[in-house]
Image (cartoon, coloured by chain):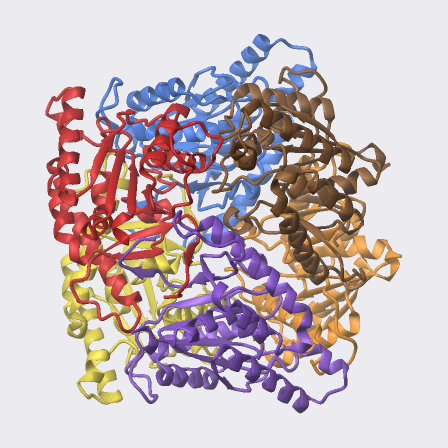
Chain colours: A purple, B red, C yellow, D blue, E orange, F brown
Amino acid sequence: MTSSRTLLVISAHAGDFVWRAGGAIALATSRGERAKVVCLSYGERGESAKAWRAGRTLEEIKAIRREEAENAAAELGAEIEFLDAGDYPLVESRELVDRLVRVYRDVVPDVVLTHTLADPYNGDHPAAARMALQARVLAQAIGYEAPGEPLGAPPVFFFEPHQPEQCDFRPEVLLDITPVFDRKRKAMECLPAQQHMWDYYTDLAKRRGVQLRRNAGPNLGLAHDTVGEAYMRLYPQVTDVLS
Amino acid sequence: MTSSRTLLVISAHAGDFVWRAGGAIALATSRGERAKVVCLSYGERGESAKAWRAGRTLEEIKAIRREEAENAAAELGAEIEFLDAGDYPLVESRELVDRLVRVYRDVVPDVVLTHTLADPYNGDHPAAARMALQARVLAQAIGYEAPGEPLGAPPVFFFEPHQPEQCDFRPEVLLDITPVFDRKRKAMECLPAQQHMWDYYTDLAKRRGVQLRRNAGPNLGLAHDTVGEAYMRLYPQVTDVLS
Amino acid sequence: MTSSRTLLVISAHAGDFVWRAGGAIALATSRGERAKVVCLSYGERGESAKAWRAGRTLEEIKAIRREEAENAAAELGAEIEFLDAGDYPLVESRELVDRLVRVYRDVVPDVVLTHTLADPYNGDHPAAARMALQARVLAQAIGYEAPGEPLGAPPVFFFEPHQPEQCDFRPEVLLDITPVFDRKRKAMECLPAQQHMWDYYTDLAKRRGVQLRRNAGPNLGLAHDTVGEAYMRLYPQVTDVLS
Amino acid sequence: MTSSRTLLVISAHAGDFVWRAGGAIALATSRGERAKVVCLSYGERGESAKAWRAGRTLEEIKAIRREEAENAAAELGAEIEFLDAGDYPLVESRELVDRLVRVYRDVVPDVVLTHTLADPYNGDHPAAARMALQARVLAQAIGYEAPGEPLGAPPVFFFEPHQPEQCDFRPEVLLDITPVFDRKRKAMECLPAQQHMWDYYTDLAKRRGVQLRRNAGPNLGLAHDTVGEAYMRLYPQVTDVLS
Amino acid sequence: MTSSRTLLVISAHAGDFVWRAGGAIALATSRGERAKVVCLSYGERGESAKAWRAGRTLEEIKAIRREEAENAAAELGAEIEFLDAGDYPLVESRELVDRLVRVYRDVVPDVVLTHTLADPYNGDHPAAARMALQARVLAQAIGYEAPGEPLGAPPVFFFEPHQPEQCDFRPEVLLDITPVFDRKRKAMECLPAQQHMWDYYTDLAKRRGVQLRRNAGPNLGLAHDTVGEAYMRLYPQVTDVLS
Amino acid sequence: MTSSRTLLVISAHAGDFVWRAGGAIALATSRGERAKVVCLSYGERGESAKAWRAGRTLEEIKAIRREEAENAAAELGAEIEFLDAGDYPLVESRELVDRLVRVYRDVVPDVVLTHTLADPYNGDHPAAARMALQARVLAQAIGYEAPGEPLGAPPVFFFEPHQPEQCDFRPEVLLDITPVFDRKRKAMECLPAQQHMWDYYTDLAKRRGVQLRRNAGPNLGLAHDTVGEAYMRLYPQVTDVLS
């Protein structure tokens, strides 16, 4: 049943999906689900300081970032698409939103992951989130002109930003990524320009794992090396069991 | 597997669990789970206006309320216990918290339901919630002197208050109670003194059902007569799948 | 005195004013006040699913929606104007804001009603609200080039969105619409494509009526069939009596 | 009609009602309404620094504060009652709440004024507010044993604390006290030990007056010497006209 | 050491920096630091009512406002630059943000002051703040094409809006401007068209001074004529001593 | 000058001050300031699981915890006092608050550190904070009967709880504890029963160090091994320089 599910990740820059949602992606693909990542930009200007300092050209940097992200996506078992909309700033436009509507209508996701709506350290992240959310609503309208059927109402999760407390981020969902963490680590290692992040996000995974164990129900018996990712929900959870 | 799960509901007055959590209780018992309701008081002073106007004595009112609540619990398949701590006001005390610790240690709940922490219309509700939460934390400590093993960390859900918006209540979890709504209705009808509430909470169930359908994922195919109950979480959700 | 007052309602789509502010409009006109509704779009793409499924063209749908809204406005005793700015998405622009400035300068409203600033289910609603608010401020400036005198500072009320709790909506003002509810119901019935909404908003009116009675001062003696609409204020209330 | 209305002010210390609600009280009594002030303490320990430094005894200080407050109340046309419950700290107790229930049942207020629920500079203020609110709810219950009839649901307003922004105070209601400000000033001058407050609260009245003019509807024509007091509401406003 | 520090103030209109940050500017320049003010517009349409009523042309008004602001800046010892981007509305654009990036790269500020992100009375203020913040982040990126070195991470402070409580403004930093208040007063007096503001902001300075004394540590010994300005922080304070 | 300053830390249990404020304490004492820690309880019931499982008696556990805390305090150069008020639950009482008032009057702190006011995982923490804050206000009143002079207004900082996001904790102050981190680590190692915490709080210190560098002004030149502690402020910062 779950093998027909699809996860859609919409991120501002090429590397975001790895640090922030690599575990969720690997969990989905390990269950046989489809995962699709859409990168609005390569993060060529704002998140490639090392390459700029090494004197690379803009086009070279985009190519490097693209290849790295493709490698990371492959490690996670995900498809990846780049919209090359430019970063720093990522400029919101009706055209870009329309491209995302078409992605939604094509992919028909069961779950959507994107950035938080606030991030005082990086304006591209909220811009990506606003477009991802607007496109999701537009894709639901039968009257919106784009190929495909009107979308249902897939739940939206915000992944954890780099400085969560300054972005009004509060873990509402703690996702146990223990079984796939080695794949997340390998995917992170596909991004050599940000090597200091490998340990940073490994430490964060442990930290969220500690919280997972503290908040888990009594019978789950989580191991001491549990690692996790944290998410917020935009919409209420719909369920038939409280747990 | 789920048949060994236990739901604990801690409420201030005898009728609260019916209006606010009757669906969750019936869902649990319909799955073969155990459900236990603890009423801190009978609601004898604050929620029995009709009986007072009819000239009943305090003891008569408590007996009436008790019988009605027992009938409603039976309809929902739940056990019920009354602590008879008095209402209007429900006075917080270390002794009452201790009694709740012993309930936790005895029942070993997998899930806990209680009132919201804010309610400007009824101070007994937050008082009950504060004690329910304090007792849950105390029951976790091996050093707390009470029979039984230290409690795990069962998730806590706040059920919906009568005027939710004034109580900072925002539906975070929408529970589909469609399959058991007839039992919730029958349980409500066990409380004849508050007959105006039967329709009020039936209307609310429909309203939450409309929201359920609007927030459900694309493949759920919820029927038009879906009815629901809304809950908030105190602690983050722990899960291994985002949905 | 009050017969010289004017109510201005600015909404995103053709039907919004009926469900959400029909009572306030009918109350105003029943007191002999002027009420003017401005619809930024017809809701042709996002709120006309039935007509799209019936194979209607865009122009046909706009004509249908226009006629329905005109009928509803007539039932409520209100004037109505359509700016035909398109929906899904309703695109914010300086030109559209300028048109609203001219409406303000022309109508000189004493009270303004519009959407909430947050609505994760419908981006057109906040877009309409942002433009309505920006235009109100611009219209106050003597230096803004548009016909008419600088506007005063009419209070602004946000009407209730479809899923209020997810839109940070909290009833701050409960308006008793009992004397005019039959006119609101008739106005709703002018919108046959959304027949499921008639009962939904009738139930909501009852729900807000119950809260009206619970929050009314001791001497108001509200009847059991009281119905209401809920609003939020953007600015502080100015008064010479606390009540 | 309004001459039968009653205003009840519940404050922690003897002087609070003058600085924070003197205008509202004078407005009420100038309309022929009844106003009753209940002071839970004299502010003998926490708000009488000058007298302590002058070497007065506790009993002398209480007598001084009492007389001053009586004079101020007389200036405002209000009755005043002292519960002498002690301050710094004002200790919450069931007995004190019960005394307030009896006040409510006796006075039958149409409007209630009290402190905000947060004040990091003075714990007595929130303690007074919590008791005032709890007693109001208890007084509504027919089953609560106290003389008189069950109370209705009088609206509650929080008056402005000394450092409003640190107390989560946001002006929601701006009350025009211009016609009675001279009486408020005279009442303030009945409190000579806090002379620095006379100008402080006169300046605040001007500041709130500026905001009154900025937020008033276009036709009110408020004069430049408008002065005001700010309030928050605990419960939604109930009305039949939006303004 | 501090003589090499630079303060950058980005404001929407020509006068804003005087009322809201004149003390901070004068303090900085009195310590020998550089202060630079950037006015995005002259406030020619929205904040020059007197001149419009006197029949001045747009160009005349801009010239008047410019001269007044230059005089005020001189009084405070600050440099000033006008971007002449128009007001009411101040329209956000990528070009204007780019101009601000260049200012940042050129000035290399140690501290940045700007408007709050919310202001329901004046949309230009949040627009200016959003651009000031976006430009600050862009200026940090080595890949952003503009002269100069990538910016560090200067702290950002929001100065106090005219109606602070409605703008979610809460004093987080109280700045003692006593030694330079006479210069702030003289700078205010350079703006004759808004004479009513001189006393308004002098009263506010006293009010913030009272709070300064109430919140100061025990040994500061602040005088009774202490005056202050209030600020909020966007980012956490970085320090090596708690005080 | 600073050598006469005093830091007061009020915590619920014996170990809290080490994990959460060890760096701030060591910084203060390394500057020659006095630091005093007051532990309301030993954490004997709620935070000594290992000892309970090892079959120790209550008195043994208290003695162990006391010795460990004394060792940790010595490592940090701080004085320590135990009020032995019991934990799980730490019961608030007027007597305990009075003891704290006497501590304030005796120690005359320049800065106060305590727990956050919210912590859904441990009710003792907010209870300690409430008493610490109430005592601070009482100690300021000349009329409060206790030895010593009325207290000034020392600023209060909340240290970081174990699960900060669930406790409404947001880093407002990032304290650079790099020069003293080795002493904090040694102090942590004085608490062998909670060995898993050593690395947890070392990781947290690194995480806060990363944020320190990201939020530091451009000229600070912080090293890559910067470590930090995070704090919130209860009251506004008072300063004469923005930085």
| Farthest residue, direction front | F54
**The image quarter in which residue D195 lies:** top right
Residue D34 visible to the viewer:
no
Q: Quadrant of the N terminus of chain A?
A: bottom left
Q: Position of residue B202 (x, y in %)?
A: 16, 51
**The image quarter in which residue F30 lies:** top right
* A213 relative to C159 in the view: left or right: right
Q: Nearer the viewer, residue C38 or A36?
A: A36
Q: Nearer the viewer, residue A179 or F237?
A: A179
Q: Nearer the viewer, residue A144 or B141?
A: B141
Examine the rendered structure and indicate whether residue E222 appears above or below residue E17.
above
Q: Nearer the viewer, residue C15 or F146?
A: F146
Q: Position of residue B140 (x, y in %)?
A: 44, 38
Examine the rendered structure and indicate whether residue F50 appears above or below residue C229.
above
Q: Position of residue E108 (x, y in %)?
A: 78, 69
Q: How many numbered dots are placed on residues in this image?
A: 0
* C136 relative to C6 in the view: left or right: right
Q: Residue at x 52, y 48 (%)?
A: F168
**The image quarter in which residue B238 lies:** bottom left
* A138 relative to F27 in the view: left or right: left
Residue E144 visible to the viewer:
yes
Q: Position of residue F81 (x, y in %)?
A: 68, 25
